[in-house]
Amino acid sequence: RVQHNMADAELVGKGIVLGVVHVLTGPDHLSALATLSANHEDIRVAFSLGIRWGVGHSLGLLIVGSIFISLTNTAAYAVEVPETASRVCEGIVGVFMLLLGTYGLVRAIRKRQNNDQTM
């Protein structure tokens, strides 16, 4: 029983480490975090936005991953994502990146206008 718990803890630990590496090496993740945290002078607000993004991203991955796992033949111990599903998911990511870029631009413009009015 103790060995089973250790294996579970090791699996969770590896998942967390791989998740951090996944976020730090993905240009879409870095641009999302940079966009959300930029234009915030209070580091606590920027940190909070980053944490909320990370939790939301993780929940989304868990949900989509769970769907694909449940639809896969578990005897093969491999999860195969259909090409069409992969393209749809990538398209959704692209739309969200465009929306995030728009959000960043609007925030930057508003911040600049507010700074110009206070001078």
Image (cartoon, rainbow, N blue to C red):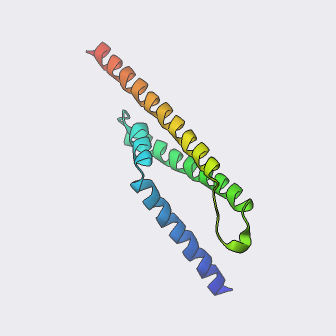
In depth, the one of 75 and 36 nearer the eye is 75
Q: Is residue 59 above or below residue 12?
A: above
Q: Residue at x 72, y 63 (%)?
A: 72
Residue 49 position, x and y percent, is 48, 42
Q: Residue at x 59, y 50 (%)?
A: 86
Residue at 40% over, 37% down: 35
Q: Quadrant of residue 78?
A: bottom right
Q: Position of residue 56 (x, y in %)?
A: 57, 47
Residue projecting furthest to the front: 83
Residue 40, percent from left and from top: 38, 35
In the image, what residue occupies the spot 50% across and 60% down? 19
Residue 44 visible in the snapshot: no
Q: Is residue 79 left or right of residue 27?
A: right
Q: Residue 88: x and y, percent?
A: 61, 43
How many numbered discs sit on the rendered protein?
Answer: 0
Tell me the quarter of the picture where residue 3 sits: bottom right
Would residue 61 be visible to someone looking at this image? yes
115, 8: nearer the viewer: 8
Q: Quadrant of the N terminus?
A: bottom right
Whether 65 is drawn above or below 48: the answer is: below
